[in-house]
Image: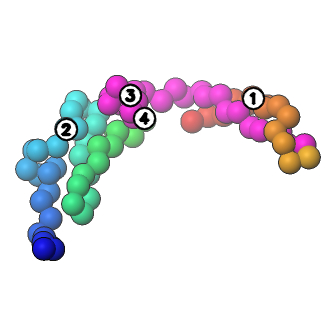
Amino acid sequence: MLVVCSTDVDECVEGSHECTGSLMHCVNRPGTYICQCRQGFQMNHAARVCEGISEMRLFRKPVWHGGNVVRYSIRRARG
């Protein structure tokens, strides 16, 4: 038997989501929801918390030779 639901439950409005803390907010999706961090923060998925993004971050750029990565160059970029 196939059951099709035509009405989406908005867990964000209902309050049945698990997005906690002032740095995280709930975003409704069809059939589910996701937790997103507010601007300037990123999700630490292991701890399920939002953490501040450093203004200066290091980026590793691969240096290719003959189809292989031979080393990484490190550069600073504003995030």
Q: The residue tagged with tag 3: helix, strand or loop?
A: loop
**Badge 2: residue crowd in 10 Å (few <14, some 14–19, many ≥20):** some
Q: Nearer the viewer, residue 18 or 3?
A: 3
74 lies left or right of 48: right
Write down the residue under mark 3. 46
**Badge 3: residue crowd in 10 Å (few <14, some 14–19, many ≥20):** few
Query: Quick check: is 50 in the magenta stretch?
Result: yes
Cα separation, mark 1 vs mark 2, equals 37 Å
- Majority secondary structure of magenta residues: strand
Cα separation, mark 3 vs mark 4, equals 12 Å
Magenta range is 42-65
Write down the residue under mark 4. 42
Pointers 1 and 2 in contact (C-beta within 8 Å): no
Write down the residue under mark 1. 74
Query: Hey, what amino acid is under mark 4?
Result: Gln
Query: Quick check: is 38 in the magenta stretch?
Result: no
Query: Hey, what amino acid is under mark 2?
Result: Glu
Answer with mark 1 or mark 3, whichever residue precedes in sequence: 3
Residue 73 in picture, x, y percent from top left: 79, 31
Q: The residue tagged with tag 4: helix, strand or loop?
A: strand
Residue 43 in picture, x, y percent from top left: 39, 34
